[in-house]
Image (spheres, grey):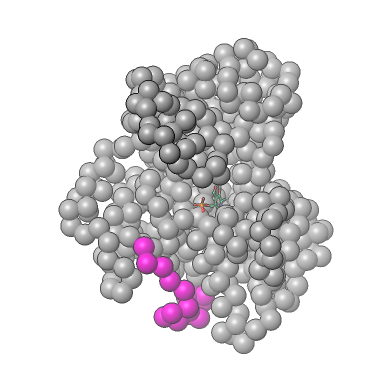
Amino acid sequence: MAPFSINESFGAQDQKVIAPLYAKANLDFVSGKGSYLFDREGNKYLDFISGIATNALGHCHPVLVEAFKNQLEKLIHLSNLFPNYPQIEFAEKLLTVTGFDKAFFCNSGTEANEGAIKFARKYFNRKGEKDRTQIVTFYNSFHGRTFGALSATGQPALREGFGDMPAGFTHVEWNDTEALKAKVNEKTCAIMLEPLAAEGGILTPSAEMIKTIAELREKFGCLVITDEIQTGVGRLGTFCGAAFYGIPADIATFAKAIGAGLPLGAVLMKQLIADELRAGDHGTTFGGNPVACTGGLALVNIVSEPAFLENVKARSAELKAGIAELIRKFGFLGEARGEGLLLGFTSERPVSEILAKAREEKLLVHRAGTNTVRFLPPLNVSSAEIGEALKKMNKALSAL
Ligand SMILES: Cc1ncc(COP(=O)(O)O)c(C=O)c1O
């Protein structure tokens, strides 16, 4: 392999050594502060992707940096062979904030969903309902890339070429309550959904669908698993996205923002499910790492404050108003999507063109589904930064 040249872009170097699994933008970021990222030349980009809804307090928030540093000097890794105090403290906080009873920590969103699926199945198995294994999920959902989570994910294209998938997953169209009623029965172990289908195009649940899920859960005694990996940790202006919509949940999965930028996932569950789990049923070496949990606790202490969540709602209203204005102005834009600070608009023009033009304006935004531009600012974004993003987007759309 040819040695790297200092003048080569990171993109060129990346292609030589990193497996080609991502379509990366050719930008060379080296540092971040708050809502901004800086490249090698010192150019400043307004980051409304936030590491895909992960940097909830922006880049290198001083409280998080301090928390990480303190824990790094005490204990970096312990394993789950011993109780881990940062994990205990963080679990207690999460359970207090969400109303769940027990926590299991892992390292990512897909792993959190694997855990949730296994716990739901084990719950019924231990209760003697051994053939209650069916999981009903939705088309256009995204639950992760490992086999269980991928089977739950309602995007057949993502499963292509990977051979047999684990059995027991059924998909229905989002908001199709008749299809949902037709699929849920005594064999249903769980209905699994994102409170708002983010990757699938920022699709919000209808009141009818929420009501139907609650009725089916009651009628058949199945569990509801909410995937809060993108909607949780305050993204919709409530700590859990399910609370925003009033979706009942027996198990909720978290990742992304929950580790304050380090890999961390969590499965929160009701006591009745924890009662049916035993040592050895599931596990992970790194899950609930002390450093990630310390950062997560520092972050959740901030994000769960009512005044902080009010700020998310206020900034959301500003961004929503600005998006509505853009839709009025540019005829090729379609409809506004989303809630909280998970917002977007659909476009008849290719989303890739809009993202590229926005990057020229030094604004980073992301796609959702096939035709939706997605804004994921940090949750502590300022009003001025929302205004700046809208101005940049206006210029980007004008330049198309
Ligand atoms: C709703 C949802 N679930 C699960 C995942 C998978 O998380 P991870 O990439 O950490 O495995 C994602 C990632 O985008 C997500 O948005």
Closer to the camera in the image, 354 or 157: 157
Picture coordinates of residue 129, whole percent (x, y) = 65, 84
Quarter of the picture containing the N terminus is top left
Q: Is residue 155 magenta?
A: no
Q: Is residue 111 above or below residue 372?
A: below
User: Magenta span covers which residues?
Assistant: 271-286
- On the image, the x and y values in percent for residue 302 come to 34, 45
In the displayed structure, does residue 339 sit left or right of residue 292? Answer: right
Left or right relative to 83: residue 173: right
Decide whether the magenta segment is chiefly helix, strand or loop: loop
Residue 8 appears at what percent x and percent y? Answer: 41, 26
Q: As drawn, is 375 to the left or to the right of 156? A: left
Q: Is residue 239 visible?
A: no
44 lies above or below 214: above
Quadrant of the image occupied by residue 215:
bottom right
Q: Pick out the residue farthest to the front.
A: 1
Q: Residue 248's image quarter?
A: bottom right
Image point (55%, 21%), residue name: 358
- Whether the magenta-drawn stretch holds residue 281 is answered as yes
Q: Nearer the viewer, residue 121 or 223?
A: 121
Going 37% across and 27% down the picture, which residue do you hit?
5
Q: Residue at x 58, y 55 (%)?
A: 145
Q: Position of residue 80 (x, y in %)?
A: 33, 70
